Image (cartoon, helix red, strand yellow):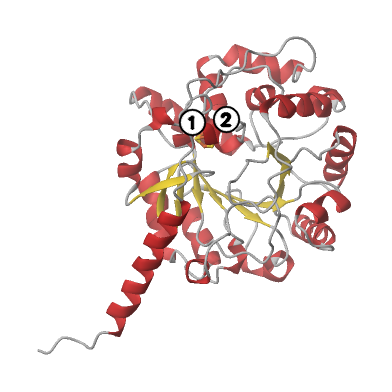
Amino acid sequence: MAIPFRQMAVVGAYLVRQHLAGRKRYPLVLMLEPLFRCNLACAGCGKIDYPDEILNQRLSVDECLAAVDECGAPVVSIAGGEPLLHRELPEVVKGIIARRKFVYLCTNALLMEKKLDQYSPNPYFVWSVHLDGDEEMHDKSVCQSGVYARAVSAIKSAKARGFRVNINCTLFNTADPQRTAAFFDRIRELGVDAITVSPGYAYERAPDQHHFLNRTKTKELFRDIFRRGRAGHAWSFSQSWLFLDFLAGNRDYRCTPWGNPTRTVFGWQRPCYLLGEGYAKSFRELMDETDWDTYGTGNYEKCADCMVHSGYEATAVKDAFAHPLAAIGVALRGVRTEGAMAPEIPLNNQRPAQFVFSRHVEHKLNEIRKGQSLAKLPPAAE
Ligand code: SF4
């Protein structure tokens, strides 16, 4: 089962509580990035292009757990950078599990086998291993040979020890539907519990700007893949059926950026996991003071091609809650891969992109340097 019954029940009860409380906006998954440092440098990654002083920053265990408490989402996805480079990560994971939140630990798996002993199988814990395709596809995607083989070896070791293991797979315009379907078959044979799949987001800081998918290509690609896998039934996905149906162009969804709020070493990131347009000091400030309507496809140029789960899965979950019969229908029938697609969101009223990266980096560097010089000051005289 892609999502165990216990997790579905906890998340379902959480959704009911939010609805009964009349909350318009609430988080589903906290994206926790305790560091930006990584031991790979993938061509499609826009997350690690920072000076060393920022890459050396870590959220402390207390800061991580405070973010979990402040946010209150029932699921925490730990990403980065490479989270396994954070020495205190086992304590962070333990603290989150103690709060009865479901932890997805995202990793490129280079350190996973070495660190498996630091973690224990638990119904609240899932390894989420980055794999963008078969050996050739993945090693090309991460710009280093041998990474696929190490990830597969780590997956086998983790499964042998009784861990739940998912993969997270990002697809670019180089993805071949036949090959991707064969890769998903291979993943199933490996005993992986579920696949999290998403089109790559066109990060403005990614070294390779030529291989991101636009929305039309994304929908065609997913139809071509699902068609080869019994409308999606051949594989086990960690995402909702309505989100998969959206990826195949059958749903006219608007983004729900507050569904996956993101905490990094900069603070609470506005508006979403993919875009760092500003930072709030607290989760409450993020929720209350972000001008949400200025983001999302159709509203903002940087959102034009986005169909990523961190923006649209929460939309699908809310839709499933509002229209359970439609959700059951897609789960039974599978994803529709033929016929007309849902109308696309017009882009004629979107506001132009703002380029704010350097300003935020400069601000953070000043903050770090100020902290360092304060630390150097002699203690005040009594
Ligand atoms: S569409 Fe939503 S999730 Fe995607 S980049 Fe824009 S705000 Fe973020």
Q: Which labelled disc corresponds to residue 304? A: 2
Amino acid on which the number 1 mark rests in the picture? Tyr
Give the residue at mark 1.
300
Q: How many marks?
A: 2
The location of residue 221, given as percent across then percent down, is: 78, 29
- From the viewer's perspective, is 326 left or right of 259? right
In this rendering, the answer to whether 133 lies above or below 267 is: above
Question: In which image quadrant can residue 80 be found?
Answer: bottom right
| 226 left or right of 91 in image | right
Specify the quadrant that holds the C terminus.
bottom left
**Quarter of the figure that contains the N terminus:** top right
Foreground of the two, 92 or 302:
302
User: Up-down: is 223 above or below 14?
Assistant: above
* Neighbourhood count class around disc 2 (C-alpha, 10 Å): few under 14, some 14–19, many 20 upward: some
Q: Note whether residue 17 is visible.
A: no
Q: Label 1 near label 2: C-beta < 8 Å?
A: yes
User: Residue drawn 65% across and 33% down?
Assistant: 239
Pinpoint residue 288: horizontal percent, then vertical percent. Answer: 30, 36
Give x and y (percent) for residue 267: 39, 54
Above or below, comparing residue 323 to residue 304 in the picture: above
Residue 110 visible at all:
yes
